[in-house]
Amino acid sequence: MWLQMRILTNSATNTQSIGETTLSAHTIAVALPVPLKRNFHYLSDSAVSPGCRVRVPFSNRELIGTVVEDNSTPHSGELKAIIEIIDEAPFANQRWWQLINFTASYYLAPIGEVISSALPKNLRDGRPLSNYRADWFQLTDVNAVAKGVQQQRCLDALRSGPMEWSQLREAKVTRATLKRLLELELVAEYDHLGAETPCRLTQSPPEPNAEQLAAITAITQSTGFSSWLIDGITGSGKTEVYLRSIEHCLAQGQQALVLVPEIALTPQTLERFSARFATRIAVLHSGLARGARCEDWVSAADGLARIIIGTRSAIFAPIPKLGLIVVDEEHDLSYKQQDGFHYSARDLAIVRAKHAQCPVILGSATPSLESLANAERGAYQRLELSARAGGASSPSVELVDIRQASRDTGLTMAALDSISSCLARGEQALVFINRRGYSPALMCQHCGWIADCPACTRHFTVHQRHQQLVCHHCDVVEPVTHRCPQCFSQQLDRVGEGTERIEERLIQLFPDTPTIRIDRDTTRSAQQLAENLELVNNGQPCILVGTQMLAKGHHFERVTLVVVLDIDSGLYAADFRAPERTGQLLTQVMGRAGRAELAGQVLVQTSLPDHPLLQSLLSQPYRIYASMLLAERQRFGQPPFSAAALLRADHPHQHQVDQCLSLARNFCANAVQHGVLQCQGPMPAPLAMRNGRQRGQLWFFASHRNKLHSAMQALDELLTNSKLVGGLRWSIDIDPQDSN
DNA sequence: AGCACGCCGACT
DNA sequence: GTCGGCGTGCTC
Ligand SMILES: [Zn+2]
Ligand SMILES: [Zn+2]
């Protein structure tokens, strides 16, 4: 009976005519880009290998899916037939699938979603890979003679070996000529896949110092999987270690993957690699044009690109001959995806290197506590680079107590004096304030009313230039009010300082010196950042004002003074990672001062000069500070001494949030009682309301990762299957980096 | 996630 | 009388 049904439904959903012998014989399981953690089964006339994309009907629309299983047995019901097979062969190898499956399971994400975030947009939309492959051509007969000058030029060009179209065009060959030669069969298409892209050094590398040499030797002489933590202060030459390790990797005929923070993928960064290696380098970055991005992605997948440089999502690029992974500035938060499924590209880099049996290098001047702990317990091998390049000494650091000093727009006399003398010496100064906009509040002089964001619990920030009140936590923007809505007074004060105001005041105080502001408002892309920094790189005296954007690994050769205006907010620890983040930020900012041969000076303005964190951070190297923080984490059983997960929920009504989190809390009650799991919460998120939605969270800790994982798997299942109220959003973040 | 179906207010 | 609001429910 059941069998009969199946056959009937098969022929019903099949477009094939009666009498034809080959019915849709193949049942395949397909992963689809929908937030459903199961595969969908379809019928296909011809065999399709797992790993190929297919176009399928899915509840009256069409989706692009990826075959994950052939010859699978469906559970029940009617099966639809696929519309089209897109890939003749799988676009990635088994190792890549291992990574995708691991990611889906570890971060509790549907496989289809993981694949989606791995593919560039156009490939997600079902465009064939061939669109993004260059056509190559070769001679059919080396002794071939052509008729005209045009044709002969083409044949001569090809005599040195196969070429792609762009090269022929450079050799002044026209499309028409090539077409004619193809028709005459004097030239044929050449299958360049499988050919190895040549690669050579274009510059003679600088001699590494003793520490660098030791690091390079250790990494290049290792075999199989190994992980390295390069802990090197700013300017200690981590890059040279990367470059030498890449050189070794390329010499073995393999490909190297380099991950960099979002803001660091600039032409200058790329220059460092292209200046050393003459080979095909793929760049994977969201800022790139879609077509170009696909070309690079495909060239990585084809094994043609020898170096792949990209941001977070580049960790998912197929790289068949992967021989090395570098994660630069490994502590950077942009490696952790904040929306969708919460993966960490840095953590996945370790997993991927393990699969590929190759080395992985994590580099940072301020390594994350996770990585330091891993090094401590021997999982990573630690390489320290302590020498400051050019032999420059560490900067002098001075605390300025703002309670004792008068200030002009947030700047103490000490700061202004230091800036003056810095500029007088012909050097550059950097003013760091981690708050963009003009002022963080707009307040009525008479009644004390403050302009608050209607959609959350924070004040509006004044943006002077655009005459707007902007909420930095929601999407709310309003025009600046000039009258208090409470008492109708027109005396409204802009209280406090942001980058825009500091910039304005510095221009007034130092009219003859250019002041450059670097924050999200002036600098939206890495490209723009590079443009804005052009002037700084010229070396003429100037003042840089900016947010943490300035702290991220940029080289300012002539900055000798760093003034830090608002470190205090980072000292009021809201979550257990705050001291780590503050320490990293301050260390990175201080590292901007005094590179090369110029001595540096750092001035930190604070109202908490005796704060223990500040004291220990400024009196000793970051690594000592970090080990103190680690000891504290250990004492409290916090990560990395336990595994953590965070359940977030939000809804317009608090009650619904509470209900969801309580459900989760009760579900785990048993495990908590048995000591398998620890819960903290439910509690409001640090920003308890955002965009008009109430936000709550529930923390989970476990001493064993696999215990946490199975608990979260079960919780995920529970919440997925619970009929939760509409509009309730929830997510489980494994290894959360940020409680917001 | 989409995109349906499905029942109640203000429009031709 | 219809157009459309978004509340539940399903997708091989
Ligand atoms: Zn007022
Ligand atoms: Zn807001």
Image (cartoon, coloured by chain):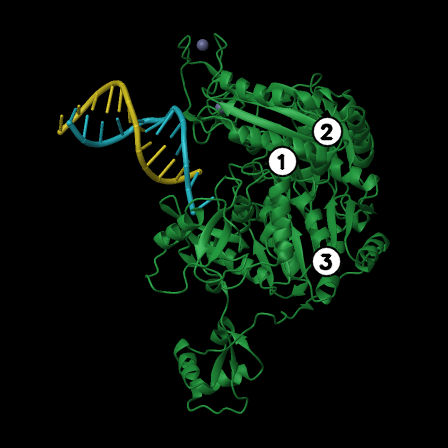
Chain colours: A green, B yellow, C cyan
State the mark number for residue A243: 3
Q: Which residue is mark 1?
A: A548
The mark that comes first in sequence, 2 or 3, is: 3
User: Quick check: A176 above or below A736?
Assistant: below
- Indicate the amino acid at tag 2: Ala
> Looking at the image, is mark 2 or mark 3 nearer the viewer?
2
Q: Secondary structure at mark 2?
A: strand
Give the number of marks: 3
Q: Residue furthest front?
A: A1
- Image side of residue A237 versus residue A432, left or right: right
In front: A642, or A84?
A84
Q: Secondary structure at mark 3?
A: helix
Reply above or below: A239 against A106.
below
Q: CA distance from mark 3 to mark 1?
A: 27 Å
Upstream in sequence: badge 3 or badge 1: 3
Q: Residue at x 47, y 87 (%)?
A: A152
**Badge 3: few (under 14), some or many (20 or more) residues near its Cα, within 10 Å?**
some
Residue C5: image x %, image y %?
Answer: 32, 27
Mark 1 residue element: helix
Which quadrant: the C terminus of chain A?
top right
* Residue denoted by label 2: A702
Q: How would you rate the neighbour count of disc 1 (Cα within 10 Å): few for under 14, some for 14-19, many for 20 or more?
A: some
Q: Nearer the viewer, residue A79 or C6?
A: A79
Q: Chain of mark 1?
A: A
